[in-house]
Amino acid sequence: MKTKINIANIAPKQVFWDMDISKLSTKQDKALIIPRMLMATTKETFLQDITNVEKLYTTNEIYVILKNTKERISNNVCRMVATRYSKPTFLRYKF
């Protein structure tokens, strides 16, 4: 993982509206950064969004963090990530 990347240059600023993004550490705050960077993704933007996350984190880190997050990640994002990494599908919300 590269720790010297300024995430303010690649992350969607609207999903970090409630904090100073320049103060986040890619290492210490990955449990917040990963889900937030994918929070607003859609089927159309997923490839670009996940590519940006993959610049910072390994596929395993992304999968595990999303699988265990309490952030509001849609089930569609969970499915797309699982499919991309050929891992078992997981859901954030169960009905």
Image: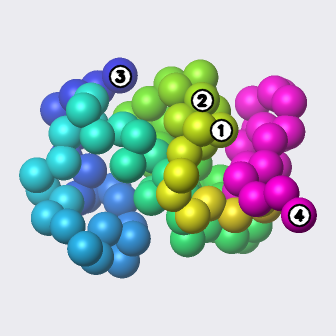
From this view, report whether residue 54 is shown above or below residue 61: below
State the image quarter where residue 8 is shown.
bottom left
Q: Which residue is rendered at x = 39% and y = 71% of the image?
A: 15
Q: Name the residue under label 1.
A: 67
Q: Mark 3 points at which residue?
A: 1
Q: Mark 4 points at which residue?
A: 95
Give the Cα distance between marks 4 and 1. Answer: 17 Å
* Amino acid type shown at disc 4: Phe
Give the Cα distance between marks 3 and 2. Answer: 15 Å
* Amino acid type shown at disc 1: Lys
Is the C-beta separation of discs 3 and 2 under 8 Å?
no
* Amino acid type shown at disc 2: Val
State the image quarter where residue 27 is shown.
top left
Q: Which residue is rendered at x = 44% and y = 30% of the image?
A: 57
Give the Cα distance between marks 2 and 4. Answer: 22 Å
Magenta span of residues: 77-95
From this view, report whether residue 32 is shown above or below residue 89: below
Magenta span includes 20: no
Q: In this view, does 92 lie to the left or right of 12?
A: right
**Residue 64: assigned label:** 2
